[in-house]
Amino acid sequence: MGLVRWRERGDLSPWSALRDLESQFNRVFGDFGLSSNWTMDPLVDISETDEAYVLEADLPGMSKQDIELSCVDNVVTIKGERKHEKKVDDEGVQRTERRYGAFQRSFEIPGGFETDKVSAEYTDGVLRVTLPKREESKPKQIDVKVL
Amino acid sequence: MTTETKQKAGEVFMTPRIDIIEQQDAVRIEAELPGVAKTGVEIQVEGDELTLTGRRRSDAQPGRVLVRERRLQQYRRVFALSRAVDSSKIKAEMRDGVLTLTIPKAEHMKPKQIPIV
């Protein structure tokens, strides 16, 4: 990657740029006023292996069909809505801590990924997205010949 | 998103988010335990205390961590049971990282229809 602007916080990792982008996204697409959006946003971990980037998001109690995953260029977006289960008339809610409603988060993956080879699975309330690396961003072994 | 509760010395737990819903003949607790399989849930009733513990699956995310927002400790939450519920008949169901506990109301707390003759 090229030169990175110096940051006062001393955070030079390319992932800080990712967070910046995300906050910009959320500023543009987030709803105004009473924002239920930010409280619903799932917590995410991202890791990197030689072959792929792996993103995991905590999304308990969702239906698979209510999670939408899209990839454009270097950006992966998770979007969805947790629907309030229909409560029967004779039920009374005593305490609500769980969050319901729509959410959206986008992440730019520095170095990019193979957009058409992305796979995702949803197990035990966790969404795991595997973003295979492009051939050119995989680490390569170069044999050094000793003459 | 979730708060931490310190319980025993050195052990830090996450407090899962819950909804409590009162039904006509039972109380339903829904707890968010993302990453916990059915086998990782432990429900213990001791006296008038119900302790819920959840352990995340151990298949850790592979590779080098780049972004870490989730805290991967165990979940724990303790509930006080009143005499109004029957703790011997608790039903538990785990689905997509949400645990649903259905605790029937004690017989004397259930609404009764009295026919007028």
Image: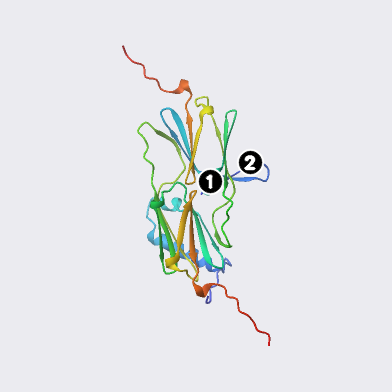
The x and y percentages for residue B95 are 47, 43
Relative to A107, is B41 above or below?
above
Tell me the residue at 42%/69% (across/down): A73
Chain hosting mark 2: B
Q: Amino acid at mark 2?
A: Gln
The residue that label 2 is drawn on is B7
Residue A102: tell me if it is visible.
no
Residue B48 is marked as none
Q: Which is in the foreground here, disc 2 or disc 1?
A: 1
Residue farthest to the left, as pictured: B117
Chain to which mark 1 belongs: B
Residue at 53% over, 46% down:
B37
User: How far apart are the alpha carbons under marks 2 and 1?
Assistant: 23 Å
Q: For the image shown, how many numbered marks are present on the structure?
A: 2
Position in image of residue A65 (x %, y %)? 38, 52
Q: Amino acid at mark 1?
A: Ala
Q: Is residue B16 left or right of residue A64?
A: right
Foreground of the two, B88 or A144: A144
The verdict on a common chain for dots 2 and 1 is yes
Residue at 65%, 84% (x, y): give it: A145
Disc 1 packing (10 Å; few <14; some 14–19; many ≥20): many
Q: Decide: is A6 above or below A78.
A: below
Q: Locate residue B73 relative to residue A91 in the image: left or right.
A: right
Categorize mark 2 by other alpha carbons within 10 Å: few (<14), some (14-19), many (20+). few
Query: Which residue reaches farthest bottom?
Result: A147
Residue located beneath label 1 in the image = B37
